[in-house]
Image (spheres, rainbow, N blue to C red):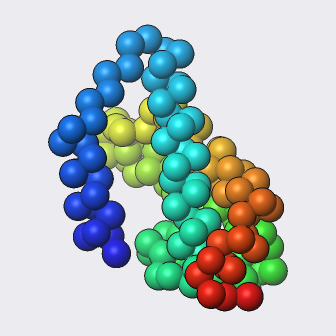
Amino acid sequence: FAFILGFFTDFIKSFLVIEPVGLIQQLLLLFVSLWIIALSVVILINCDLVPSAPDGFVQVLSSKLNKEFGNVKVFHDIIIASTGVVIGFVHGKPEGLGIATVIAALTLGKMISILEIYLKKPIRKLCGLN
């Protein structure tokens, strides 16, 4: 599945060029991207498709803890980002952790939770699951 997703991402990037100018446009593009990612995770999880390894881990953990996927996702993402910062400091300087990563870690799980409220049943029905 990751191969197919990568193929379509590269295909769309080949003809869709978006150059955000300024902070407002960058933040707008970030939030649009996060909603698209959240929608894709909701579809994967609710159609019983194999998610990415991190989302699969979150799915199993949320099931075992009997907690909502979105809440566990926020906790997981914060732990992963924090671990990256610590490892970065140990090796000199953390790179790749910017404001977009922090915003994603704090909001993506909540976005997933919001979409699940409205889309879980229709998606499961569309996938032939009830």
Residue 89 at x, y percent in the picture: 40, 42
Residue at 28 percent across and 69 percent down: it is 4
Is any part of residue 109 visible from this angle?
yes
Quadrant containing the N terminus in the rendered view: bottom left
Quadrant containing the C terminus in the rendered view: bottom right
| Residue 62 placement: quadrant | bottom right
Total marks drawn? 0
**Residue closest to the far left:** 14
- In screen coordinates, is 101 left or right of 105? left
Residue at 53 percent across and 77 percent down: it is 56
Q: Residue 21, relative to residue 26: is it above or below? A: above
Of residues 95 and 115, which is closer to you in this image? 115
Of residues 119 and 5, which is closer to you in this image? 119
Residue 85 at x, y percent in the picture: 46, 45
Q: Residue 51, relative to residue 116: is it above or below? A: below
| Residue 112 placement: quadrant | bottom right
Residue 104 at x, y percent in the picture: 56, 43
